[in-house]
Amino acid sequence: MSNATLELQQEQQMSAAQQPAPNNGTMLRLEDLKPRMGFKGKVVHVELGGAFVDIGGIIGFLHISQVVTSDGKPILRLADVLKPGSEVQVYVKRVNLKQKRVDLTMHQPPAYGWDNLQVGMVIQNAKVVSVESFGVFVDFDGPKHGLVPFNLMPKDFRPKVGDVLEKLWVIEVDEPRRRIGLTMVEPPALPWDRIRKGEKYTGTVTRVERNAAYVDIGAEREGVVRASSLGVTYADMRAIVSQGEQVTVKVLRADPSRRILELALDGVDAKDLVLSSGPEEELSPFAVALQRAQQLKRSQEATKAEQANN
């Protein structure tokens, strides 16, 4: 998934979570509820510890600790604040499908929660709230402050408390350990943990040598296509691809610990590939080189067969 696609999904999730749920006359289902969804609810019953609120066919529980008053004063008796029939703005705090329970709150929830934070998503306008020896903590309207280490900032950049960091990327979301890691350095569109052997990608040739070509597929580093991967005795990669060319490649090996990414040009098989029979000048340089490699391999196989018969 590209960064652009992830940002689009992020905007859709944020919009769905922050906007009040539409009331189009259809009955809500418990499965449709998500944390931070907002509703204009109606109080149906008040108890000492909280109130039951109808949010559109589903009754949720609003604990007394989640009730907000206009004057901000402590609540001594909930019945003095809420009465059956009262309309209240509430938000979904949590949903328990097994118990068929919905907890509500009148506190406006943060824009981000543990449920919609994803590695790779973009965070904008985060405010620095603390500076430590290893990095800074920022408030981005999430479930807790995020950490931006100094080694993931531009060189010689040291923000102060109160500074606003315009653009960050999420690199870690660990709810059990309550850790959120952020970076100011844009991460690769294709992280190591998403690269699988055998998968195919379209990339750009960035450098060509006689025995190898280097292709950018959006990973942390370029992948290498070795001439030996063509399956012929000899091939000059400079005659097969050129810098700036778009090629389709297949992953042969991905080793994140050693930062090794080995690729092969997709579809290059001298035995199976069928090329045009027209003159070489009408073929692409890539096709010409492969045709020559195919012819060379056939010649070598014929020589071996002749020697075996003799």
Image (cartoon, grey):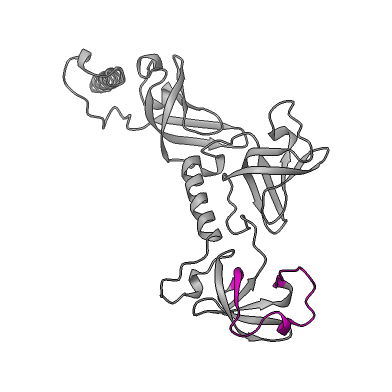
Question: For the view shown, which residue lies furthest in the front direction?
Answer: 71
Residue 78 in magenta? yes
At x 52% / y 50%, what residue is drawn?
10
Residue 207 in view of the camera: yes
Instruction: Please state if 246 lies on the left or on the right of 85 as rendered.
Output: left
What quarter of the picture does the C terminus occupy?
A: top left
Coordinates of residue 297 in the picture (x, y in percent) = 29, 21
Coordinates of residue 146 in the picture (x, y in percent) = 71, 47
At x 59% / y 47%, what residue is drawn?
119
Residue 99 in view of the camera: no
Identify which residue, 93 or 185, lies in the foreground: 93
In the depicted structure, whether residue 271 falls above or below residue 62 = above
Coordinates of residue 1 in the picture (x, y in percent) = 47, 44
State which quadrant residue 89 falls in. Answer: bottom right
Instruction: Please state if 284 lies on the left or on the right of 126 as rendered.
Output: left
In the depicted structure, whether residue 180 falls above or below residue 301 = below
At x 48% / y 53%, what residue is drawn?
12
State which quadrant residue 231 falls in. Answer: top left
State which quadrant residue 126 falls in. Answer: top right
In the depicted structure, whether residue 133 falls above or below residue 79 = above
Q: Which residues are magenta?
A: 66-95
Instruction: Please state if 7 lies on the left or on the right of 289 as rendered.
Output: right
In the depicted structure, whether residue 136 falls above or below residue 38 = above
Identify which residue, 235 or 135, lies in the foreground: 135
Residue 293 in magenta? no
Coordinates of residue 124 in the picture (x, y in percent) = 61, 43
Question: For the view shown, which residue lies furthest in the right direction?
Answer: 133
